[in-house]
Image (cartoon, rainbow, N blue to C red):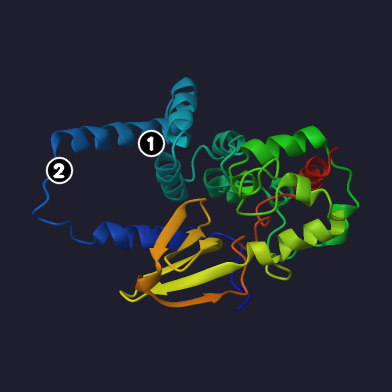
Amino acid sequence: MPYVGSHQIDAAGVALLRDWIRSLPSPEDKPVDKTRQQRRVKNRKLLNDALGGEPAARREAIEQLLASTSGALRLAVEQHERQAARSELAAAALKLENPATRDLFEHILPESARRKSLGDSIDPQLILAMKGSRERGRQLFEKAVGLQCRKCHQADEKSQSIGPSLAQLKKLKKADLLDSILRPSKRIEPQFVTYLVETKAGRVFSGLLADRNERRIVLLDATGKRINIAANDIEFTAPQQKSLMPELQLRDSTAQEVADLLEFLFAK
């Protein structure tokens, strides 16, 4: 079912959920130890400094809180309530590489200044018409938090890969490669078919078929981990029509970033 909800954050709704969570009773048999209490005091001071302190203290507190996902989330929730330090928060957060942290504060910016992520509706022709940067694409492939290409696609064909190697990708047409990223389950080469295995104990595993004989089946899961399953423990096994590559891989990227990535992937 397609997403049909709002793309705007409802500040009142966030506050309502926060207040409801805070109203839930805490376990009486779990006393707060001294270390945890000190951490709470420190976090509260950081939040107060970030949203109402002097300029120098505010900048330092914002930087500390944004250094972790938990700190950024506390800051985002608190900011909804106080509506303070909006421009500084947005400026600092948009410099972050992790989209899960950065996007917590994007709603602060006016629509015209927000990051133009592709979202769920992507026009391949728009991306293919753009000029990409090989160097920026390399940086995205090697370091971007939101893209996981490097985990599954090796530089060469010497080692078993979860997905086609970069050398294999270069043999495709650019339009076909983009289509395979946008719709990973449309065409799956036999060696990259996902297999599902259910054991007699009811455990379910999935991954690429790395090895199979009369004694065992070996799967390679999405993280590259090898899973050994004894043949006499197997209840059921079958190939799947869905790729291990996740859908909507590019939704948090911009059109220019995808053009850069394609330029890197096709670099000779």
The C terminus appears in which quarter of the rendering? top right
Badge 1, how many Cα within 10 Å: few under 14, some, many 20+?
Answer: many
179 relative to 203 in the view: left or right: right
> How far across and down, in percent of the image, does residue 12 sit?
46, 61
Above or below — where is 250 with respect to 65?
below
Provide the residue designation for mark 2. Answer: 32
The N terminus appears in which quarter of the rendering? bottom right
Q: Secondary structure at mark 1?
A: helix
Q: Nearer the viewer, residue 79 or 242?
A: 242
Q: In the image as oriented, which residue stretches furthest toward the left?
A: 29
Q: Going 48% across and 36% down the picture, which residue do you hit?
A: 66
Q: Nearer the viewer, residue 61 or 210?
A: 210
Q: In the image as oriented, which residue stretches furthest toward the top?
A: 56
Q: Nearer the viewer, residue 131 or 150?
A: 150
Q: Going 46% across and 27% down the picture, which residue do you hit?
A: 58
Badge 2, how many Cα within 10 Å: few under 14, some, many 20+?
Answer: few
Q: Amino acid at mark 2?
A: Val
Provide the residue designation for mark 1. Answer: 47
Q: Secondary structure at mark 2?
A: loop
Q: Nearer the viewer, residue 146 or 227?
A: 227
The answer to which image quadrant residue 159 occupies is: top right
Ranked by sequence position, the earlier of labels 2 and 1 is 2
Between disc 2 and disc 1, the foreground one is 2
88 relative to 187 in the view: left or right: left
The answer to which image quadrant residue 54 occupies is: top left
Above or below — where is 48 with respect to 149?
above
Q: Amino acid at mark 1?
A: Leu
Real-space Cα separation, disc 2 to disc 1, in angstroms: 20 Å
254 relative to 123 in the view: left or right: left
